Amino acid sequence: MSENNSTETQEKPAAAEPSAPAAKQAAGEGKNLMFGIAGVIVAFAIVIGINLIGPSVPGRIDFTENKRHTLSEGTKTILDRLDTEVQIKFYVSTGSDEKIPSIFLNRVRDIGNLLREYKREADDFIKVQKINPQPDTEEEYNAQLAGIARTQFSDRSEAYYGIAVSCLDQTQALPAIAGISEEQFEYHLTRAISQV
């Protein structure tokens, strides 16, 4: 029995202490984790800062290849020469009874952005209104009076989708925006402004 007790009472080896290189590695991983968290916090702060400051900075950056969101020099020249207020009324049906097909919604947004660029470039000489003419209303009557009629789309729906440009007692209409290519839209709008 004494032999069995001796084997049972033998000391178990103590847990090995971590070596110096392993301790340094663990400390390094802790530092990397802290730097990673700090990096995420800094990036988050930058994004929030840009979103807070961005809207107050005039203009925008156009990264498109052909600068399709930037006004041409010819348009800027015409807008800089304005000395009388020009009103641009963007008639677009967005109601539940009449509305433009969903494939045109991005174009409506792009036109709205372009009109803001016109307004920004011309200071106080361009006034822009987006109007949703409902059937049998004064807005519908004014749209028709300006030369804007309902546009029939390929899905057989009808809706208002046009622009009237007016200055004093003259009005030029772009009654069928759907038929004007995106590349030619600025030209047609600027031409209408120069003719009123």
Image (cartoon, grey):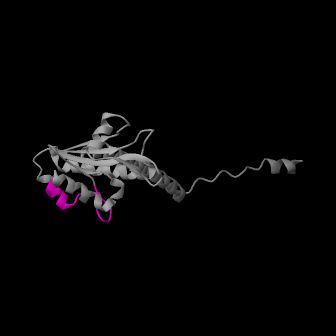
Residue 75 covered by magenta stretch: yes
Secondary structure mostly seen in magenta is loop
Specify the quadrant of the image occupied by residue 94: top left
Residue 99 visible in the current orientation: yes
Could you say which is closer to the camera, residue 178 or residue 111?
A: 178
Q: Where is residue 173 shown, x and y percent of the image?
A: 25, 50
From the viewer's perspective, is 51 left or right of 2? Answer: left
Foreground pick, 85 / 50: 85
- Tell me what residue is drawn at x 38 percent, y 37 percent: 135
The image position of residue 187, as x and y in percent, is 24, 59
**Is 176 contained in the magenta span?**
no
Q: Is residue 90 toward the left or the right of residue 24 in the image?
A: left
Vertical side of 78 occupied by 128: above or below: above
Q: Position of residue 69 (x, y in %)?
A: 29, 57
Magenta highlight range:
61-78
Direction bottom: furthest residue: 65
Residue at point 15% right, 56% down?
78
User: Please, which residue is most extreme toward the right here?
Assistant: 1
Please provide percent x and percent y for residue 38.
40, 48
The answer to which image quadrant residue 99 occupies is top left
Q: Is residue 112 visible?
A: no
Along the horizontal axis of the image, is 24 left or right of 106?
A: right
